[in-house]
Image (cartoon, helix red, strand yellow):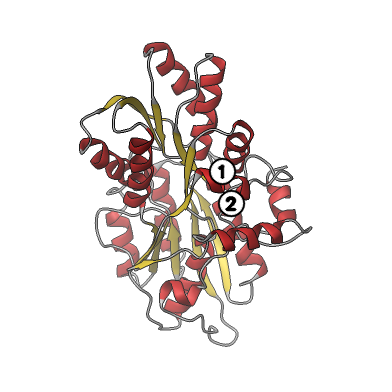
Amino acid sequence: MKKVLALVLCAALLLSLAACGGAGNTSTVAPASASEASGASTAEPAAGEKIKVGYDIYFLGNSWSVQLYQEFKWNAENKFADQIDVTYVESEGDISKQIANLEDLIAQEVDVIITTPNDTTALNATLQEAMDAGIKVILLCAGIDGDTYDTLITVDETEFGRVGAEWLVEQLGGEGKIICLNGISGLSTSELRYEGAKAVFDENPGIELLAVEDANWDYATGKTVTSDLLAAYPEIDGVWSQGGGMTLGAIEAFQAANRELVPMTGEDNNGLMKKWNELGSEGIGCAKPTWLSRIAIESAIAMMNGESVEKDQIYDVQVIATEDIPDYVHPDLSDDVWCGTELPEDVLKEIFS
């Protein structure tokens, strides 16, 4: 069942930005409450007992994954320290290491495992082992091909890809040559986003896909890949990109090659918002908030207290249109910050100093 993000409306945007103007204030996005998101309230655990949570840091190779982890950690230490005790493992984007880490958490007899799968099928047996051991399994921000989990918390990734693709097709008048920048190969997030976009492109025969490349949601990789494609193709009319870091790299690659900027899609990365605002160029951003990590904690507590939690907590995608971009620019924060966060500004500045 889809749940609507609280920041779709511009009025909410302006309120959140006003809040961000003060020192140490809270989020750039006003999320739904946990009980609204999961259909479950967060009851207190049994007196004197803490829930043992195993948190798998799936990857720290880009600023979004860093913010997701840091937001989880901040919530665990500042809002839920009296209810949960967290054991952290780090998988470094390696599926073999992720399997070994989850096996270790199972052996430690944690109550709940929270993980972001680095592969859509390779974890299924391990997750089933966890569930057979009575461990609750929460998938955070990426799913699997299967049902060996208790709840999945993410956004509608197919819609994410579709929205950006439809905007790009409209900008090009239904005709043009484009390149596509995907995330990390094998991760469901990347696959579903491209699936949504490809369906739109297939419906528009005037759109020619020159190249589809993985750029790992990374600024430097996005810049390098785009530079190579600019050298290979004298005419590129648009860029469909899954992530703000990659899009910022793509913009700078166009500038370095002295090529005219073209319509591009992206995410809610602060550096990208700054660049788009500075250039006044056409763009659209979709957001996947890192405050979903807080929903994961609240879902863990709810399940351990015997409360009902929806199996698939899928949020609608927040869309940042060209005319709204100035409202998302945060000049005092690092380019690496992502707008969909509840973290206080001083914490964000410390993380991305």
Residue at image coords 40%, 28%: 238
Residue 138 drawn above or below residue 100: below
Residue 4 locus on image (x, y percent): 42, 65
Left/right placement of residue 305 relative to residue 165 reads right
The answer to whether residue 224 of the structure is visible from this angle is yes
Q: From the viewer's perspective, tell me whether residue 83 is left or right of residue 180.
A: right
The quadrant of the image that shows the N terminus is bottom left
Secondary element at tag 2 = loop
Q: Give the label on residue 148, or none.
A: none
Residue, far front: 173
Helix, strand or loop for disc 1:
loop
Name the amino acid, label 2: Cys
Q: Which one is nearer the viewer's eye here, 60 or 174? A: 174
Image position of 272 with respect to 236: above or below: below
| Residue that carries the numbered disc 2 in the rendered image | 339
Q: Do the residues labelled 1 and 2 touch (CB within 8 Å)?
A: yes
Residue under the point 62% across and 50% down: 327
Is residue 27 in view from this perspective? no
Query: Mark 1 and mark 2: span between their CA atoms?
Result: 6 Å
Looking at the rendered structure, which numbered label has been put on residue 269? 1
Up/down of 196 relative to 216, above or below: below
Mark 1 nearby-residue class (10 Å; few <14, some 14–19, many ≥20):
many
Lower sequence index among marks 1 and 2? 1
Position of residue 48 measured from the top left corner of the image (x, y, whole percent): 60, 84
Q: Residue at x 52, y 61 (%)?
A: 7
Amino acid type at mark 1? Asn
* Crowding near the residue tagged with mark 2, few <14, some 14–19, many ≥20 C-alpha atoms within 10 Å: many
Residue 331: image quadrant is top right
In which quadrant will I find the C terminus? top right
